[in-house]
Amino acid sequence: MAIKKKARPLGDLSQASLSDIAFLLLVFFIATTIFPTEKGIPLILPGKASSVAQINRKNVMVIHTDAAGNIFVDDQPWAINQLKDEVKRRMSENDKLVISIETHADAPYKAMVAVLDEVKLAEATKISIKMYRG
Amino acid sequence: MARFERSIVTESNIPTSSMADIAFLLLIFFIVTTIFRIEQGLPIVLPRAEAGEKLPRQHLANIYIDLAGDISIDDKLIHVTDIEPLLVTKLQENSQLVVGLKFDEGVPYRTVDQCLQQMKSANALNTAFTVEQKLHGRH
């Protein structure tokens, strides 16, 4: 005897919550998207109109970089990882201290940024950058 | 005589069930067709630093200099002496302009100095040396 197969009705898929899922995904991606932000070391340049101020040599700390990227503090060879502490120490001694970052024309840009980074990390505000002339 | 009753109730409604479909269709259409203007710049390796701060995107104008010494602003290759007039017009459009300096880490400081001199004479004084963020304590 042949057994008749019961024709089962196909199950219905509920579509009522479809938009809920869509919005959930939308909200998830809106919340997790991060736009790439650029980071930079800000510096305000002196304008051509600003007067050339005379500064006492005692209040200037010269950090110069030679063509090979070696760093000198007031003509003394210095290690980059001790620069921040030295700048901090000098600033605590003299609150009028101006830091002059002088870089040789042939030195790579990264050497100057490395010095500027350390000086900025020492929270110095009076910074001057220029080309090193022997 | 038999009276015919007029059926006056003519209900008409616009089906609103497909409204969401239309909305999504429009959304997808505009997502697909929107093109963002992205600056190509020059291929450079930024120097790494810890003291980087977030730069204001809406006031930013980037100057690219690569290892070969090519200079690019707004995806146009220019000469060093063209930096000043370009920045002057940019400053007129936006007085809060911040010049982002995207220089390759190996660019000689001579080139950097020339660029800074141009910025000084253009009176574009608000600058930022764009860097790659370095985590604390790593060299």
Image: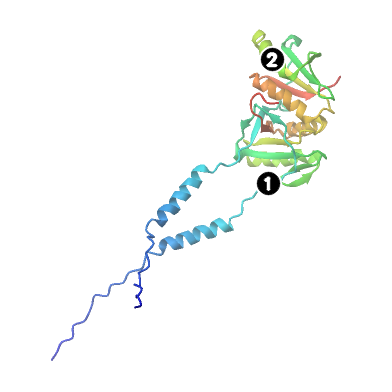
Residue B133 quadrant: top right
Identify the residue at image location x=50%, y=47%: A29
Q: Nearer the viewer, residue A113 or B100?
A: A113
Q: A34 left or right of A108?
A: left
Label 2 lies in what chain?
Answer: A
Quadrant containing the N terminus of chain A in the rendered view: bottom left
Q: Is residue B133 above or below residue A14?
A: above
Residue A58 quadrant: top right
The reply to whether dot 2 and dot 1 touch (C-beta < 8 Å) is no
Which residue ends up furthest to the right in the rendered image? A134
Q: Nearer the viewer, residue A41 or A86?
A: A86
Q: Is residue A13 above or below residue B133?
A: below
Residue where numbered disc 2 is placed = A87
Find residue A115 and report its horizontal and vertical position in percent. 73, 23
Q: Secondary structure at mark 2?
A: helix
Quadrant containing the C terminus of chain A in the rendered view: top right
Identify the residue at image location x=73%, y=42%: B86
Q: Identity of the amino acid at label 2?
A: Val
Label 1 lies in what chain?
Answer: B
Which residue ends up furthest to the bottom in the rendered image? B1
Q: Identity of the amino acid at label 1?
A: Glu
Find residue A13 and report its horizontal and vertical position in percent. 39, 62
Q: CA distance from mark 2 to mark 1?
A: 38 Å
Identify the residue at image location x=75%, y=31%: B116
Find residue A40 and report its horizontal and vertical position in percent. 66, 32
Q: Nearer the viewer, residue A98 or B96?
A: A98
Residue B39's tag is 1
Find residue B92 and report its horizontal and vertical position in percent. 66, 40
Q: Residues within 10 Å of mark 2 (few under 14, many from 20)?
A: many
Q: Secondary structure at mark 1?
A: loop
